Structures are given as structure tokens and as C-alpha cells.
Image (spheres, coloured by chain):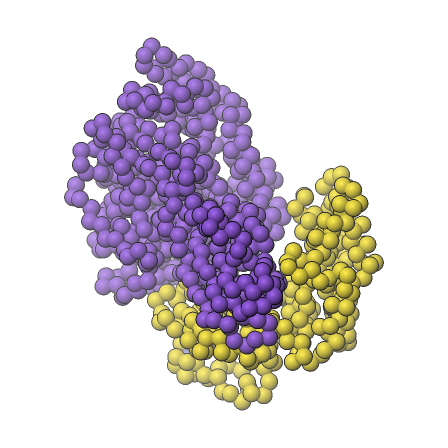
Amino acid sequence: MSKAKLRSSLLAVLRCNTAHSTAINFPNVSNSALSSQLPSNCISLSQLPSTAECFRLWRSSRCECLNNLRFPSRVFSSRSAEASDLKLRCWNCGAAAPTSVVFLVCDSCRSIQPLDQSVDYFQIFGLEKKYEIGDVNLESQYKDWQKKLHPDLVHSKSDREREYAAEQSARVIDAYRTLSKPLSRAIYILKLEGLDVNEEDTISEPELLNEIMEIREAVEDASGSQELNQIQSQMQEKLNHWSNTFAKALRNRNFDDAISSIQRMTYYERVKEEITKKL
Amino acid sequence: MAEPIYTVASDSETTGEDRSAPIFPEIAVGIDIGTSQCSIAFWNGSQVELLKNTRNQKIMRSYVTFKDDTPSGGVINELSHEYDMLSGAAIFNMKRLIGRVDTDPVVHASKSLPFLVQTLDIGVRPFVAALVNNVWRSTTPEEVLAIFLVELKMMAEHQLKRPIRNVVLTIPVSFSRFQLTRVERACAMAGLQVRLMPEPTAVALLYAQQQQQQAVHENMGSGSEKIALIFNMGAGYCDVAVSATGGGVSQIKALAGSPIGGEDLLQNTMKYLLPNVESIFSHRGIDEIRRMGLLRVATQDAIHKLSFQSSVQIDVNLGNGSKLCKVLSREEFEMVNSEVFEKCKNLVNQCLHDARVGIDDLSDVVVVGGCSNIPKIRSLLMQKSKKKALYEGMNPLEAAVSGAALEGAVASGIADPFGSLDLLSIQATPLAIGIRADGNSFIPIIPKNTTMPARKELVFTTVKDNQSEALIVVYEGEETRAEENHLLGYFKIIGIPPAPKGLPEITICMDIDSSNMLRVLAGARLPGAHHPATPFMEVKMPTVDDGHGWCAEALHGKYGAAMDLVSLQKKS
Ligand SMILES: [Zn+2]
């Protein structure tokens, strides 16, 4: 493959294949999001309750359709004073919510509770809101939740509870998927901090661009699975490195570095994916 | 035999919305209607049991004969001879035809069957007919399916002494949602409410139950997580799944499927044995149908024998003085069908890739279905998985139906004092669902292998200044070009506020609920606006009914790119 062709295909990969091709020529794009630390200043569409959100609310008729659009970032508000003031009780039997674990299912009557968006993914898995989650077994916890929440298991219950089951179950799926991968976990934790990282359209540094291009060239030229496996493990090393860098940046609340770590992780992940396709 | 009584559901509601409380205690029933064989199983309170027909068969033939005036199926009916099935009076392989249009290669491959499959090649349903007293009498795949469903239902009601209304039915992975509506229609005709379950996921649930029991037996608590590769190949379809099982929960990580199966092996081999087979058969005279039948039976028999011996002698008298005498070796059989086996291998590779699972992570490789005895299939899977042995814990012909009955039992909330139903199957979407945008591209909104229930959205924008309408064409599939996927339906968004192109935000949200119902929600607004410009649209999919092959073409011809969309922004 010629260099020019390679570059153009690289550009295509780095750029999201969507309508607006911001990215490469505008190095400041990624910084605009983080320069405004106040969530209210950087409301992007994703911080409004999404259409999916409204759809859900609408279907369970807990909201007059889309009028709720004007309440931004309700989704990611931390579980602060207002939440703890409110004594949560089971909608079915009235039993009080336990204080130690997140209240998705009532311990007394096994009823599935309505979705509470203020509960974050970490709380669902009983984790501290920290990037490093150690070797906690998410998979088995995820399955335990599904056994309590999955809509297939409440077919004989009321419409109301089946709706709760569908919502809770879907949220646990999202939580599991998000937390189980370092990259998505990193993006999520920044989201909780009020920073929306768009992994699709951010690349600013020519060095990184060059490095990625060289790697891709190496992948292109690799003569066998052994070589590919070698690049693969190099990528894994880089991922581990930037994952650690991200963790450190986050601890120091250095969001610039955190975001640039995420960008790098995104590209190395992509290379890995490409290698997997070739293997 | 009494004429089966059909109850036909209303047009829009082929899926079960009726949740009225059952008068009789619920019994969980699973049905597997294969391309060539069918079976029915129920949960007897402690385990799954397969029902037998009056001839003591658990695995029955999937066909319907139209003799005299009463159609009758392979559940109750007994053929005096195998050739009777090939006389043109019997309709079979309907699972390969249901919900397909006459431009589909699978439909074309069915044209060499002894009954009539006629195509006009314009994207409408094919014409199917049985030969009754020298007359081609028309029928439909739905009707044929409904007939054996009624027979299975009657048989089960008789033996279990209660009415059967709710069943779990297994379906191929590659079925589109449109095909599912046709299966649901057949079930409704037979008076059944169905829950549809992809075949390998039913097998995965059975596997989860077996692992759970073993863990309890060995006192290992809930046991460790096991990744299984499930390969299910019958007469009509080849399906692959990767599941992660632990604590009785089977999470489907990836699915892959294709309409290839034993029927293709059979047809390829017939063509090899008698190269001019198609021209001999093209006129469809009664003699020709009979001769074709003789060849089919002999070939089927030979393929079966080749699973156990390395070569087979074939002797068929084809009438008119022509005879076929040949020794067919296993190598020849494998060579003739190398393309089919290659496709099987590709499906396995794709599924493992999509599941992001390495060979070393696989605990077990489960091979089931009518083709599971074929040595090439077994060696292919052992080679691919680098395993010396395949999983042996289940009967390959009974696995899918047993899993379906288990799913029925788990989902119906039947009392389970021993905890043997402490199971769950978490499904994933077998195909991506999205819309046509960015020119003629298929833009998935809910990707393939998304865990269900699922809800996803994407934002699009207009391609023209002051574009006030957008055509939303919904497809399901894996192809990059929109029209190569299955069309599910279409509708228009109107009242997009006037603005330069690229500015309005058109949000398309897709939702698959716990009963596998797909809804598409769409709305338009200008950036920053808190309110949508016009009421949102909510559309249940699929909306296409028939002739969907030419719908898409007609839409394109009429509107061109006037109401197109491009994607705006990636969101999860
Ligand atoms: Zn309660």
C-alpha cells in the first residue's frame, strides 16, 4: 500500500465517518470541552436526557413526553443531599431501602424497584467511584443482578414491574459493559465529573498521528501471525501504560492529561481491533 | 382426522399481547420445527421430557401431504414409503422458504424440490404448490407450518391432558424480523402464543443447566465461568453462538448464522452424481418428479452412510433404462461440498471474533443438529478449537427443543422447589438494526450482538437546505449497502424546522423490549431547542408485509435522494 493511500485511509479511521469532519485540522477541539469545567457551560446533547431517556420516561408515562428536555445533567447529578433526605421505600410493600447496598430490588418482597438515575454504575457493583477497580469479579455480580432483575423472570408480574425490570436490567447491562473495559470506564468516570469526551473526533498531536501511522504500517506489512501478535502485545503494553497515566491524572484531577490518555487508549484499542481482524 | 381449527390473529398483532391468566396450571412447552425434522418437549416438574407420537417417535418429519382434501403432517401421518414424500404431494423444507421473497437465492435453490416453487424474481413471495391428483394446488409456508404446529399441539394436549397455548419455538439465527412475523403468523393460525428463541441460544441454556447441576453435584457452589462455542447445523441452517455461562446464567456473547445446511450438502452431491440433474428435471412431469425422488433418497442414504464408512455404493434405477451406479467416497463428498464447509468455518471464526473470545478461553465446543455426525464438521470444529474432544453431554437432535422447554419453564415462573430452574438466558441481537443514511449506506443503530433488552440512538441531519421531510428506511442485517439488508419498514419525519443543511438534529432511537418488540422513535429539532419541532413518531417494526423486495426500489425510484439523511454524531 502506498504512503498516500495509507494516510488517507488513516485519516478515514481517525475521523469519525460522520458528517462533520472536525478533528485533525482543528487541534483545539478537544480542549474546548475541558476548558469549561462547569457542566452547565458545556452542555452537549449527550448531557441532556437523551431521546432514549425521554422515550423510556414517556413509555412508562412518568413524564409528559419530551418537555423534560430542559432539565440538563439530571442524569449525572451526584447522589447528594437531596437523595439521602428522601427515605427510599419499596413501592410494593413499603419496606425501607437498605443503606448498605444499592436499592434495585426489595429484600423483603423481591419486587424490582423503579429506575433511579442518580445511582451510578460503580454503586451498582458496590464499588468506590474509582478508575482502578482491581480484580473484582464484575461478571458474576452482573449475572447475580440479572437473576434478580431480568424481565424474562417477571413475566407473570404486573406491567409496572415488568417495565421496571426492563429498565433496571438494561441499565445493569450498560453498567457492566462500561465498567468492564478500561477505556469505557475511563470515559464514564470523566462523564461523572461532568466532562464529555468524544472519542470519535479528537486528535491533535502530530507525534501521535505519526506514531499511529507507523504502527498501522507495521500492521499492514506484518508477514504473519507471529509478527501481528508481537504488535498486539506492544499495544497492550501501551494501553496499560496510558491506563496508569489516566489513573494518575485523575487522582491529581488533571483533566487535560486524563483526556489525552483516553485519546491514546482509543487509538491503541483500534489498532488492536484491526489486528484481531487480521489474525 | 378432524379438520384442524385455525384461529387467526389480527393483522397488526402477531405477537403475544394477551397475558390473561391461564385457567389450567401453566405447562412449559418447547417446539423445534426444523427444516426436515420437528420435536416437542415439556418441563415435567423436575426435568425436560420429549413427547412421542403414536409411532413412538420423538423426532418427527417436518412435512405436510396434500392427499385427497385433508392436509396432514408428519406428526400424525405415516408415509407408506419414503418416496411418497417425494411424489410432489408433500411439502417440506418450509423453514427455508418462510418469509423469503422470490429473488432470494435460498428460494431459487428450493426449485429443484419435488413440489412446485415458482418465482417471478421481482421481490414478492414465491408461489408454492403441492401435486394433488395431477393438479398443482397452492399453499403457503405459513399454512404448512401451521399444520404441523396444530398436529404437535393436538398431540401434546392429548398426552398432557390440558390445553396448550404458550410455547417457546426455536428459530434460526439468520431469520430477519420480517421472517419472525411470518413464523408468528403461522403460530397464531395454530392458536399458539409464541416466544421465539434462536436455536443455539436454546442449546446454550441447556448447557448452562447442565453446568449448574454439575457444580451443585460437585459441591462447587455456582461453579466457575465457562465459555462455550455452540455449533448447530441442521438441514436448512447453520448457527453458531458463543456463550459465557456461570451460576446458571447463559449470557450470549455473539451469534452468527447462515441458511446453509444438510439440504445444500444433498443438492451438491446430487448434482455431482448426476451432472445434468437440473435439465432432466426442468419440465416437472410426473415421471421426472418420481426419478428425482429416487435420486434424492439414494443420495440422502449415501450421505448418511458416509458418516460411518469411508465410501458407499450407490445403485439407482432412474427408469427409461438409465441407471446410476457409482461408488462415492467420503473425500469426494467433502470435495463437492468444500464451499459449504468453508462457510461453516467462516461462521465460527466470525462468531469467535465478535465475541472477542480466544481459542484458549473455550471450555467446551458443543456440536448439535442433524449434521453433527458428519466427520468433516466434527474435525473442522476440533481443529478450529484445538480440542481433542467435543462436548458429549447432550443428544444432538434433542438439545434445541430441550433448551426451548427449559426457557419456557424459566420464563413462566413455574414453581421450582428444587432450584433446578434457577437459570437465565440473556439474549443478544443476532443482526444489526439501523437505517439508510450517508447515501446508500446501512447505518446500524442497535449493533449486532447487543444484549437485550436494548435501547440505542443516533443523531442524523439533513442533506439539503430547508429540507422539511426525511425518509426513515429501517433495515436489519450486516451488509454495508442498505438494500442488501432485510427491509423492516419505512416512515417519514415531517415538519423539520427550516435550516441550512447539516443543522437540524434528527434523532433516531431504537428500542427492543423484553418481549423482543422493536420500536423506532424519531424526532427532529434544531440544536439548542429544548422542544422537538413536531411530535415524535413511534413506529413498531416491521411494518412491511409482503413484496418488500420491490418496496425499497419503489421508494428509491419515487423519492431519489430528496429525503435523505446523513449521520451527525456518534453516541452510545
Ligand atoms: Zn418490597
Answer with the quarter of the image where residue B320 lies: top left
Q: In this view, does B438 lie to the left or right of A92?
A: right
**Residue B18 vs residue A143, the one in the foreground:** B18
Question: Outermost residue, bottom direction?
Answer: A85
B417, above or below A79, in the image: above
Q: State the count of labels.
A: 0
Residue A205 seen in this snapshot: yes
Residue shown at 78% from the left, 54% from the top: A212
Residue B217 seen in this snapshot: no
Residue shown at 18% from the left, 33% from the top: B68
Q: Where is residue A41 in the image (x, y as percent from the top left)?
A: 67, 79
**Residue B502 vs residue A70, the one in the foreground:** B502
**Residue B180 vs residue B397, the one in the foreground:** B180
Q: Where is residue B382 in the image (x, y as percent from the top left)?
A: 56, 38
Q: In this view, does B491 lie to the left or right of A5?
A: left
Residue shown at 32% from the left, 24% from the top: B284
Chain A tint as drawn: yellow
A75, above or below B39, in the image: below
Q: Where is residue B267 in the image (x, y as percent from the top left)?
A: 43, 28
Question: Outermost residue, top direction?
Answer: B321
Quarter in which the N terminus of chain A is drawn: top right
Q: In this view, does B267 lie to the left or right of A195?
A: left
Quarter in which the C terminus of chain A is drawn: top right
Residue shown at 52% from the left, 40% from the top: B390
Image-quarter location of ligand 1: bottom left
A201, above or below B239, in the image: below
Chain coloured purple here: B
**Residue B208 vs residue B513, the one in the foreground:** B513
Q: Position of residue B39 (x, y in %)?
A: 33, 43
Q: In this view, does B218 lie to the left or right of A22?
A: left
Question: Outermost residue, right direction?
Answer: A207
